Amino acid sequence: MKYKRLLLKLSGESLMGEKQYGIDPAMLEQYALEIKKVHEMGTQIAIVIGGGNIFRGVQAEKAGIDRVQGDYMGMLATVINAMALQSALEKNGMYTRLMSGIKMEQVCEPFIRRRAVRHLEKNRIVIFGAGIGNPYFTTDSTASLRAIEVEADVVLKGTRVDGVYTADPEKDPTATRYDKISFQEVFEKNLNVMDMTAFTLCHENNLPIIVFDMNKQGNLLKLAQGEDVGTLITA
């Protein structure tokens, strides 16, 4: 396996599957089986998942909700998704730990860096919920920060598209995909990969990012084995 320890970033919207809202059990099962294939090969896995299928903090302002209040609501949505994913992983025979940026002892552990690393060393899958516990930070930023803190080798961003394109491939049929691109080129071309805080964190800490299609079966295992899947962003 190419990576000893990786952080997988999943969007909350991906859990909707064919639904318009909420969690599709079929998607949970699919993701759990994909993660299991990699875990069984000995790779240590940390996961950050968004909450956009339930609530997005940035949408709260449009509804007249205070932005800070909305962001905390969004953090709680990520915990719901994390609990659902944890259940699916454990149902498929994996040991997991859910760690939260907000204290809620009856549901999950508080995030403590050394404890998170120890869980990974014991081959438990660690899911980070509730963002970093502060408003105004996205789950992309959480993924970058947690990956740096637990010394992951790479951030794998699972999306609906198979990499980074010159333009939005769902809107522009002439858009072409990059196999590999540098952090500097992404800045210069103003490509939409992650929010700027998350992207800068990875750039400054020389942490590579791979953007790939998580919904295509086998992609996660191929990446973990070092095959060229999606777009690699590196220094």
Image (cartoon, helix red, strand yellow):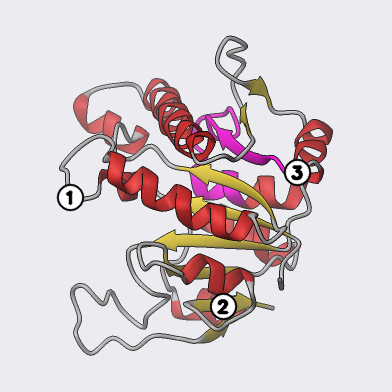
Q: Secondary structure at mark 2?
A: strand
* Quarter of the rendering occupied by the N terminus: bottom right
Q: Which residue is mark 2?
A: 232
The residue that appears at 66% across and 61% down in the rendered structure is 202
Mark sitting earlier along the chain (2/1): 1
The residue that appears at 55% across and 52% down in the rendered structure is 36
Note whether residue 195 is visible.
no
Specify the segment rendered in magenta: 123-143
Mark sitting earlier along the chain (1/3): 1
Residue type, label 2: Leu
Residue type, label 3: Leu
Real-space Cα distance between discs 3 and 2?
Answer: 24 Å
Q: Which residue is mark 1?
A: 18
Q: Position of residue 215 (x, y in %)?
A: 35, 62
In this picture, is 26 found above or below 224? above
How many discs appear? Answer: 3
